[in-house]
Amino acid sequence: MFIDPSYLMFAVPPLLLGLWAQFRVKSAFNKYSQVATQSGVTGAQAAIRLLQRGGLGNVSVEMTHGMLSDHYDPRVKVLRLSEEVYSLPSIASVGVAAHEAGHALQDKNAYFPLTIRSAMVPVVSLGSWLGPIIFMVGLFLSGTLGSSLAWVGLILFAGTALFAVVTLPVEFDASRRAKELLVSQGIISQREMEGVNAILDAAALTYVAAAAQAIMQLLYYVMLMNRRND
């Protein structure tokens, strides 16, 4: 099977960054899931406290399956926490739960990057897989039709790269809110913040890696277009 050497130049660096980020997340989470909070507060209790503090009594907190499957669903106003995060009074649990509560607070305050990202979801869901297919079909077809299809595919996939970039301020801001609220609400002490920082900063790096991967793939497609037109 032939692999374009130039593709490796675009693909390998963000791949390595992503693997490193995933390693850091798992390592930090495993470490600090074994360290109990001094306050004895579980992830679910932390999330509920922060939501109530933010005037979000309408947002429910539920348990869901899967490791680190935690997320906030703005459509139904539900914050879903994985079993370990939901039930354990660990530094890892409250850190992750507070981050997701940060997304709920963004939703309440109509945080602009979150609004943009939410609006982009339907288009990105389609473009992330359909864009590359259309691009490759157009790339190998000759004439105006091939060129037009390639550009359509490229534009569709560009939405995926833009989505990954827009996600960065959303995730960074949610972590910032989480860190501030955990201390101000007495859930975590300043000494315990080392663990929260380790987890949330590592998680942020995964989004940086995802954005880098999308951008580099887009640049690779642009390079292929330039080759085609030469």
Image (cartoon, grey):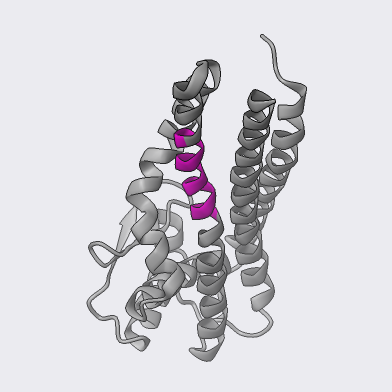
From what the image shows, is residue 204 above or below residue 151?
Answer: below
Q: Position of residue 60 (x, y in %)?
A: 26, 69
Say which quarter of the image contains residue 75: bottom left
Say which quarter of the image contains residue 85: bottom left
**Is-magenta flag for residue 108?**
no
Residues shaded magenta: 152-164
- Give whichever of 194, 180 is nearer the camera: 180
Q: Residue furthest front?
A: 144
Number of callouts: 0
From what the image shows, is residue 100 above or below residue 212?
Answer: below
Q: Position of residue 4 (x, y in %)?
A: 72, 20
From what the image shows, is residue 13 above or below residue 26?
Answer: above
Q: Position of residue 35 (x, y in %)?
A: 61, 66
**Is-magenta flag for residue 153?**
yes
Residue depicted at 53% across the width and 74% down the height = 173
Q: Position of residue 154 (x, y in %)?
A: 51, 37
Residue depicted at 77% across the width and 23% down the height = 5
- Give whichever of 131, 13 is nearer the camera: 131
- Give whichever of 149, 109 is nearer the camera: 149
From where the camera sits, is residue 42 visible?
A: no
Residue depicted at 66% across the width and 9% down the height = 1
From where the camera sits, is residue 208 visible?
A: yes
Left or right, 160 with reference to 56: right
From what the image shows, is residue 48 above or below residue 30?
Answer: below
Residue depicted at 66% across the width and 45% down the height = 18
Q: Quadrant of the C terminus?
A: top right
Type of secondary structure dominating the magenta stretch = helix
